[in-house]
Structures are given as structure tokens and as C-alpha cells.
Amino acid sequence: TVYTLSCYVRSADPGRAWIGGSERWRIRFHFKPTGNKWMRIVGTFKTNPTERNFHLMILTESPTSGIWIDDVQLEEGDKVTAFQMPIKLKSGDVRIVVERAHVNPNLVPNSSFEEVHGNRPHHWMWDRRNTDATMTVDETIARSGKRSIKLTNGTPFGAHVYGWFGLVGSIPVKPNTAYTVSCYVRTEGAGIAWIGGGKRWRIRAMFPRVTTGGRWVRVWKSFVTEPDEKTFALMIVTESPTKGIWIDDVKFEEGDRPTPYVPDFEKPHPSLELELPPPKSVEHRGILFMPIWKPERYPIHEHVFAGEQVWLEGLLYLPERLGRAQLRVLIERTDTGEVVKRAMHEYDFDAGAYDVEIGWGCADADLARYRIRAWLEPVASKEGANVTATGQRKNILASAQLEFYLYSRRTVLAQIEKVRRMLAQLDDAIAKLQRRGEDTSYPQVTASIVRDFIGYALEDVNYGEVGRAWDAGVVMERLLRDELVQIENVLKGKA
Ligand SMILES: [Ca+2]
């Protein structure tokens, strides 16, 4: 894939210095003297077939009196575009971004299982093999269209024991090329099951082992075809017991990430989907990781450790040109029903798919469960014309909503502050114990752990590790409370 790297440089005598990186630092774009002006350094390069990450660096290799560098940008394609600042929302701001979606073609026929021949979807095949597994076309549950497929399995996991559902024939692919396989899954626990296949069945996007909570969850996997791989056998395999897995909207596409699923059957309605993207990877103490903290206690679709801003991602699909319309957003608290924020974005919509992003600067939001609703409506001739006498909205073309608990920066800092106050109480209590000649070694250990934690937690908040800071705050509070109760008992002479 071709990428373009750019930055602005100002230096009268940069010496030997460059921006670049990659494997064995093979990409180097050298700085030139710019006098006292800012000049943009631009370079284009192509990644190797096996390259999945780019290690970016700026190196100075000989004397210079100083180099100023700003606005570093890495983008796909061979053209440099204006430098874009990452959007930072002020507390209370709501931003709606609507852009034409990039949608790669889907190489899977009948990918939503809408076309049924007898008791199986056209183009697909089911073989329960050595299991009691079942495959049915379910006409009561669908992510898009009217149908999905449902798999059940009662046979325990064992070597070469599985039920097989797959595409008849295989998908032609190009060697040494990135592809992505994806589908939507809904389950109360899928056991061991996956979508994938290919040579030696090496590609496996595992289905969730735990409940998806009545929601459709997209699973996907990207891979690069082998030098001699010209076809791909696509399949869904169940290897252990499950009461039910529903699958819909399968996609196999070129490229190293899944692009939106767009229905391929006739005349779908306008549709809007919203989802909470998984937390963005953060770099902390030199390690890159995805900050999901204790998912069993804080399921990621229910608890959002947003810190300063939360972004919802969505897809709007319009089968026909719509013209000017408004995408409206309402944020409300589910406990009090209070409307926290409204926002609107007017846009000239053609037929096709649009990426929708909704950002909320929530640094000061209370800890609460929030509902974010978004809907599309035609531009009203006058204010309120789209609302009926009973307050119901009419002419809503598509809508979606999400609910979650939100932990803002303020929420987490307040928890840390609470811990700090309790620590001061503990210090006082320890002093009292010491005056009475009691042993204070245990409470002192607790106090010292908590003192360290406060520093780490503040650092976590600043690095975007909001979930860990919150959870540690809750644990520290419990620890301090137990310790204070014990000391109180000692002081009262009970222990
Ligand atoms: Ca379907």
C-alpha cells in the first residue's frame, strides 16, 4: 500500500537529519536548509507485503544549531493533503461528522441469506458431519433483510469434530494481497465457533464466547494471501456446544480492514446504525495496547471510560438520493430523562453509504447512564413541522440509539479525590494509634499503597487509561474503608 508522510521543518542548518522509519529504517526523507521559513517535507513510500505496522522516527545524525518540526502527518495514498489536527472537543460540545463512506465490494454472494432454496440459503452448504449440530434459516431474527442463519450444536469439542457451513465453490483471490473477512453474530455464547477458512483453514475470526446481549456484533479478521493462494474457501465452523448462534451479513473484501456492510438485496430502506468503537490503542510507558479494563466487570458496550470525549461511529445507508436532510442527535440521561445536549447537521445526501461520527466532549459529565439517539429527517419548511400534535416526530427516515454508562474525566478525578481525603483520614487515625502505642505496621502499608496509587491513577487519566484509574479508585476506596473501620474498632477498644 502506498502512504505519504509529511511534516513541516524550519532550520537554517539541519545537518544530516531525516523523518521516516519502517523496517530497517528503510524510509528516509532528508531535511534541507529552510532559512528561517517553515517548509513542508513530503515523501511517498510503499509498504512491504508483510508490513503491518510503521515505526515512525525523526533522526539527527550530525551537528545542527536547531531544527523545529511540526504537523507530522501520515496518510494513505500518494498525495499529501492539508494537515489535519485531531479533533479535540471542548467540554459540552457535540460534533457530527458526515462523510461519504468508502465501501469495498463484497465478494460473497447471498451474503445476507435472503435467497433461500429449499431449507438452505442459495450458494451456501451445510454439513453437520459428526455432530448433532443444526443449521436453520431463521425468519424471525435478521440484522438486515428478513433472514439470518442459526446454528446450534450439542456435541462436545473433540479432534476433527465440527459442523461446517460454507460457500459453495470458493472466492477467487489475488496472491500476496490483504483481504478481510467479517460477519455479524448474535449469541448467548457461541462456544468455539468462527468464520474464516482459506489454506489450511488458517484464518479464523472467533465468535464471542459470552453473550452479545441481544445485539449484533461484528467479528472480523484481516490477512494477507500466500504467494500461491488464488482461491479462498469461506466457511463458518462450530466446534463445541452452543444453544444458538445467529449469523448475518457476511463480507469478504479486499483490504486490511472491514468496510461497511451494504445490503445487496433489492430495495432496502434507508438505515442508520450506531456503535461504540472499541477503545483506541494508547501508548503508555512505551507499550501500545488497547485499554479495555476488566471487561467481565465493565462490558465494553455498557461502560464507556471516555475521559474527555466519546465518539460514536455509524453508517447511514440510502438506497436513493435524498437531497437536503438533517441528521439530528439527542443526548439524554436515562435516570432523570434530562436532555443533556441536542445537535443537528444538515447535508445534501446522495444515494449510497455515509460514515457518521458523533463526538461529545464529556469531560465534565456526571456518572450516569446516557442514551444517544440519532435520526434522519427531511428539512422542515418551518420549525416543528416534523412534529405531530402529540409531540411524536413524523417523517423519520432512519434512526438509531445507544445506551451506556459514561465515566468522564471529572468522575474519575472525583473518585481519586475521595480516595485522597480518605487517605488523610487514615493518616490521622495512624497518628492516633501511634500516640496510644499501638502497632501501626498494617495500616501504614495500606497508606503507602494508596499514596502510590494516587500518583499512578492521575498518570493513567492523563494517558487515557481512564478505566484502570476508575477501577483502582474503587478498590482503594474499599481498602481504606476497611482499614478505617478496623482502626476505629481498635480505638474504641473493641479489637
Ligand atoms: Ca439477512
Image (tube, grey):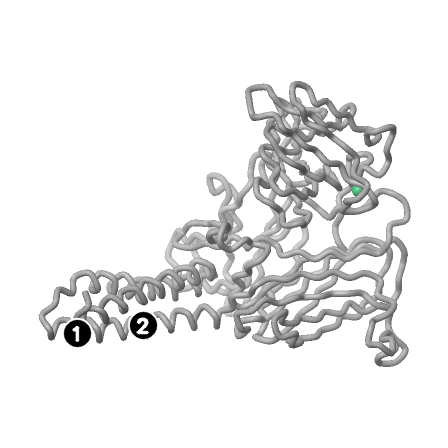
Amino acid, disc 1: Ala
* Circle number at residue 431: 1
Q: Is residue 168 above or below residue 105?
A: above
Horizontal side, residue 322 vs residue 365: left or right: right
Rendering quarter of residue 380 = bottom right
Q: Are marks 1 and 2 in contact (CB under 8 Å)?
A: no
Q: Position of residue 184 (x, y in %)?
A: 70, 43
- Real-space Cα separation, disc 1 to disc 2, in angstroms: 14 Å
The residue pinned by badge 2 equals 422
Label located before the other in sequence (1 or 2):
2
- The image quadrant where one finds the C terminus is bottom left
Q: Position of residue 359 (x, y in %)?
A: 64, 66
Q: Position of residue 94 (x, y in %)?
A: 65, 72
Number of residues whose C-alpha sits closer than 10 Å to that of mark 2, classed few (under 14), some (14–19) or many (20 or more): some
Amino acid, disc 2: Met
Q: Position of residue 176 (x, y in %)?
A: 64, 30
